[in-house]
Amino acid sequence: MTSSTETETTSTSDGAVKPSLFARIGNFLSKTPSGDLTTPNSSPLALNGNVRIAWQGDPFQLILGNVALEFHPDLPLTGSEKGGSREWIVHPGHAFYETTPKFIRIKPGEAVILGRSEDLQTWVFGFDKSVADRHVKVFNRKGDLVFQPLEPELPTCISKIDSSTPVWKARRDNLLRLPNVLGCPMVQFENEQALDIIREVNAIVASEAYRSLDDDGNPGGIIQFPNDMTVVVLGDVHARADNVLRVVAEGGLLASLESNKACLVFLGDMVHSQENNELEDMKSSVFILDLFCMLKRRFPKNVFYVHGNHESFSPDVGKGGVLQGMLFQRHLRTLRGKAYVGEIEKLFDGLAFVVQGNNFAACHGAPVRSKVNLNVLVNIRRYPGIQSELVWNRLRRGDRPSGYSKGSVKRFRRTLNLPKHAPLIVGHTPQSNEDTLWLDVGGIEGHHIVYSAHTHRLAAMVMSEGHATPLEFVPEAALTFLKNAAAGDVQG
């Protein structure tokens, strides 16, 4: 922020596009309150008034009633406190590192009210009745946090954490062990081995887990996860490997993949950078498919790739006049040969179009507008028109009368036997170049857009036990870090 007027995030119910996570951004016309500067120590400090914690490298905990929350500065892989976004990650403690991570993020200029009135916070942090509906307000002032207790009669304390791994260090450790987990260095495949690897991956996809066979004996068009499986959904990646690695290395996701407790879904459009200065650069698209193959070979029942509109060599695929589909095909043929191009076509043709889990569904672009049944989705190869809708269509508006509507979402939920407001997650249509996650889009409750290809920020949605937890991440140069680590240039 460039003035003393701060931005507060608050919940709204008007059904408009909502750009933030736990509370929505609104105008806040008063100054952020000041507070007494405090350094957390091992002895809990009771909050009897406003307290300010300066931007620092050390995490601390906030205790609300019987519940402890950990506050961690979102530092880069080097652990440097200088520069960066000065954002804080708030998570529930040990579970963040042991299972699929759930957290909230507080950016500079934002304020969040912590308490049981926010259902999502109650789910993420496990709030019980010792926590008030509106327990404490937290402001981020250019990295410094100001805590304003809202229930002076209820206990609220701050203290140092003596035995918690900093979020950045846990992510760094996960990243450093990832090559060993995957069984290969995080570099582009040698052309000679690439053909054998893509054939191996295509064999996995041809008998992919959680997919019923269609009437021709091929994997059907829908992946249906068990109800007890946690599913992490990434939107369009568009060749940004660093974004993928940021998510995979965060908290306990990698461990959850290893223990078969979670699945990772790429919601289409993995290839073709959308940055204006990179539209013709196909090198990143080659590597992102190599990265998918690394993950799929190691986690055949836990990593999934859904069809998007960019999974094609068609001349219809492109941006800004650049025929990216055809250009990618030509690049692959020159780099790895005709047989490899054929295997990539086979991969694209074999991808599912829809995923379904415990009270949610996701697809790349849009729900089908017409009434369909599950058998049609399983046998989707016979319905090219429905394939096209799922990957190409967008929400209806004045200049797009053939787009899908609230009624389309409602019918699609009925097709999949989902509850009335079950989350339907799509990518394909980012609502701005700044944000990366939009909730209840078009005034449709539970209709969310996730986009994971921006260079400054990306989003994911964690689906677990019927709950949707939206997450935001700040990308970092993970591949460069791994390259330096392999060369022995990383300390610590």
Image (tube, helix red, strand yellow):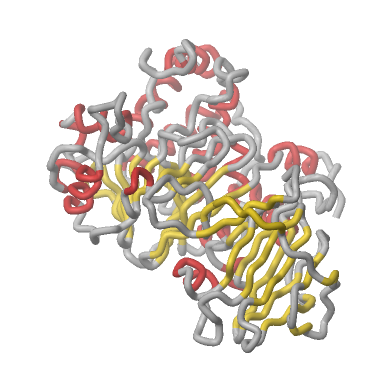
Q: Nearer the viewer, residue 15 or 56?
A: 15
Q: In this picture, is 344 found above or below 314?
A: below
Q: Is residue 110 above or below residue 441?
A: below
Q: Is residue 277 left or right of residue 319?
A: right
Q: Where, by quadrant of the figure, is residue 35 drawn?
A: bottom right
| Residue lying at 52% horizontally and 40% vertically, measured from the top left | 452
Q: Is residue 219 visible?
A: no
For this rendering, which residue is in front, 282 or 350?
282
Q: Is residue 390 left or right of residue 192?
A: left
> Which of 446/30 is in front?
30
Is 19 on the left-hand or right-hand side of 231?
Answer: right
- The residue sitting at 44% across, 53% down in the picture is 302
Above or below 57: residue 218: above
Q: Is residue 106 left or right of residue 230?
A: right
Residue 65: which quarter of the image? bottom right
Determine the residue positioned at 62% across, 18% down: 277
Q: Position of residue 276 (x, y in %)?
A: 58, 19
Q: How many discs appear?
A: 0
Q: Position of residue 285 (x, y in %)?
A: 54, 26
172 in relation to 132, above or below = above
Q: Position of residue 272 (x, y in %)?
A: 50, 25
Q: Residue at x 63, y 42 (%)?
A: 184
Q: Quadrant of the N terminus?
A: top right
